[in-house]
Image: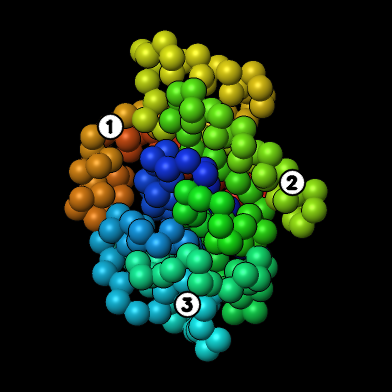
Amino acid sequence: MAVRLVICNRKGGTGKTTVSVNLAAGLANKGLKVLLLDLDSQGHCSSGLGIKARDNFIHDIFHKNDANFVASLRRTDIPNLWLSPADPNFDHSQGRLDPHRLSRVLESSGVDDAFDIIIMDTPPSLDMLLRNALLAARWVIVPFVPHYLSYEGVKQLVKLMYDIKKTENPDLQLKGFLPTMASQTKRHHRQVMNDVASHFGAQRMLPPIRCDIRLVDAFAIGEPIQIFDPRSRGADDFSALCERLSDDFRTPA
């Protein structure tokens, strides 16, 4: 059974999709068979991987009785990496309200047994898609920009996560907090990262992803940073993150 990992933060602009795409590509490069699910209807995972999705989307399972989830899987140009793309026309208010829909589809389709890890990129809102992801997941990574408002959003999300853990998904675990667009030279950034570490434990902090315009440039081209500019600091940071995580995901607890 695949390790299921959700990338989430209820606040927008924290780099969730950048993390999802580059983490998925980095883990695939380490030999793990990876499936990326784009639950955010903005569809930016497709852009980041240079894929033009025209039919069969991950969102079909939430509003079509005859949806073929397996047909939505696209092999990317990255060896070992597949994508189930978002439907940019999906109406978040019209989908099925079944919060266990995604988990059931992953199990019944056989996809769960075909991959080492399934990464879920989520929308920046508390809706049925985020709840589906949290109920389907084993692990959670929370990207956050190190400033005060983002820290408040982190605390709100952690409360939601633990409420779900207590009532609906006892297997759900926090893998860690991931500072994004981080700067060690900015006093406020350092202070917020220290506050998160003090509040939740230093062992919960993942290696930060620093500001790097090359990450934006890579998305514009439709390539992961490791391919677009392997010598950039963005590539270095994602390599460090993948090194930290790959052994855990290869032999899940």
Give SS at disc 3. Answer: helix
Q: Amino acid at mark 1?
A: Asp
For residue 115, side relative to residue 147 (left or right): right
For residue 52, side relative to residue 80 (left or right): left
Measuring from the top left, give residue 28's x and y in whole percent: 44, 55
Q: Nearer the viewer, residue 204 or 56?
A: 56
The residue positioned 19% from the left and 53% from the top of the image is 221
- Tag of residue 60: 3
Residue that mark 2 sits on: 163
Measuring from the top left, give residue 44's x and y in whole percent: 33, 56
Residue that mark 1 sits on: 212
Which of the marked residues, 3 or 1, is nearer the chain's N terminus? 3
Circle 1 residues within 10 Å: few <14, some 14–19, many ≥20: some
User: Does residue 21 show up?
Assistant: yes
Q: Nearer the viewer, residue 74 or 161?
A: 161
Give SS at disc 1. Answer: loop
Which of the marked residues, 2 or 3, is nearer the chain's N terminus? 3
Q: Is residue 196 above or below residue 246?
A: above
Circle 2 residues within 10 Å: few <14, some 14–19, many ≥20: few
